[in-house]
Amino acid sequence: MSNATTELVQQLIRNECVNDGTIESGHETRNANTIASALEQSKLDFEFFEEIPGRASIVSRITGSDSEAPKLLLQGHTDVVPALALDWDFDPFGGEIIDGYVTGRGAVDMFNITAAMAIAMINISNSGFKPKGDIIFAGLADEEAGGNYGARYLVENHYDLVQANYVLSESGGTHMVNNDKTFLPVVIGEKGVHWVKIEIEGTPSHGSKPYGADNSNIKAVELIQRFIDFKPPIQFIQGWETFLGALGINKELVTKLNSQESVDQALLEIDQPLDSVLHSCCHHTFSPNVIHGGVKVNTIADHTYIELDIRTLPGTTCEQLASMINEVLGNYSDQVRISYLQNEESTISPTSTPLWDSLQAVSSSIFPGAHLLPTISTFGTDSRYWRYKGAIAYGAALFDPTDVNYQDHLAMFHGRNEKVSIKSLAHTTDLYEGVIRSLQDFT
Ligand SMILES: [Zn+2]
């Protein structure tokens, strides 16, 4: 069965569905067509949803025996971010197999999962297995630019077709070892994404007399410094200590990283890029990425704006973030104008669920003794659209222990030289098939 997943990943890579954020990019209909040809062979029905020409998402369904039973959605995106061929050791859109790995843009973000889901649907359909609740597959366009033409469009306009109680998507599943025990990360939540624009006014006057002037640039710099100095409470997710140990961090450092008092000091002892990953997993982050102000060198600036990329930890609401921003602004509160370029709340799913139990049972049937480990994603994924609707959504896959480790796997997301082993593709396909078959036993 692994061959079918491998071949599908290769074709999806070669279709070059590159989403650069413009409406004209993506061309995900190419990948929807490729998946459709695979589904057709096993007589699975499917439907295209193409809000924007060329940007189709594809949805397929295996109808269960009980329309009241919980439904499971397997959703994966079909677009990728750009890749510069010069930077890579192989052709990013060649889909070549090199030393047992499928290589190319999308190999881990996230055609390994999207393809394994489609093939799991096909295998289940061919086997004649009848699930109790509906099993839905969605290959989604535009995830890499926020999902507006894919997940968001479907959830807002055709929710009846993609409604599910349980959802699987990216990423997770690389082997992590702590004290001889194997842990498999499962993404249970993701940080909120809040892009905030703050406009600051000043009073224009001659640049030759700056003393006492009302300069909007100076106020903006002061505000940015306040955001840098702002220290809202640190939060650790469930299983944080185990997660740290499974990264190969020594015990003494794990103890320091597991304390709100010493974590910031301990992060100085961690190398890049792991330090920034760990930092983002336990801090709200405020990154002032745009500053624009003033019009002329001899004129005191009277208008400046800054744009902050704010990422909040799971459990934080938009209201809570707004009050944090107000706290930072302090005396500037009534002198600035705030607008949100994006304001999407963090999401998290509990682990005491039938889907978790099913994933655990199937994973440990393939890798005896392996334990699921909850993690969060520092970036946004399409799963949030279903969590907002109340669904339980996890990022779950299953890699081979010989495949790359957690850190190297993370570095491939939007990075160079993406690759996934053929063995991992087989395990991930088996995982989804196993969950489709066993979920009903845990509900
Ligand atoms: Zn992705």
Image (spheres, rainbow, N blue to C red):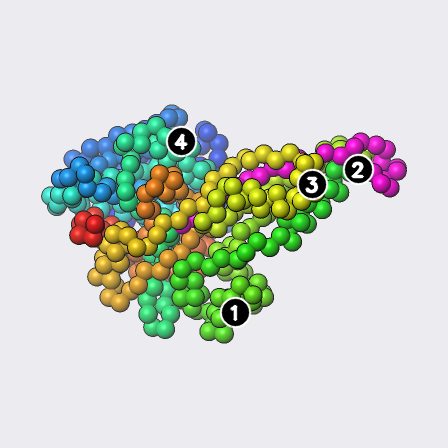
Closer to the observer: label 3 or label 4? 3
Q: Secondary structure at mark 4?
A: loop
Residue highlighted by disc 1? 256
Closer to the observer: label 2 or label 4? 2
Q: Are marks 2 and 4 in contact (CB under 8 Å)?
A: no
At label 3, the amino acid type is Tyr
Name the residue: 22% across, 43% down: 70
Extreme-right residue of the structure: 208
At label 2, the amino acid type is Asp
Residues under labels 2 and 3: Cα distance? 13 Å
Decide if residue 431 is in sight here.
Answer: no
The mark that comes first in sequence, 2 or 3, is: 2
Q: Is mark 3 within 8 Å of ligand 1?
A: no
Q: Secondary structure at mark 1?
A: helix
Residues under labels 3 and 1: Cα distance? 36 Å
Residues under labels 4 and 1: Cα distance? 44 Å
At label 1, the amino acid type is Lys
Residue highlighted by disc 2? 214
Residues under labels 1 and 2: Cα distance? 45 Å
Residue highlighted by disc 3? 332
**In the visual, does 118 lie left or right of 412?**
left
Name the residue: 32% across, 52% down: 396
The mark that comes first in sequence, 3 or 4, is: 4
The mark that comes first in sequence, 1 or 2, is: 2
At label 4, the amino acid type is Tyr
Magenta residue span: 189-213
On residue 149, the disc is: 4
Residues under labels 2 and 4: Cα distance? 44 Å
x, y percent for residue 136: 24, 39
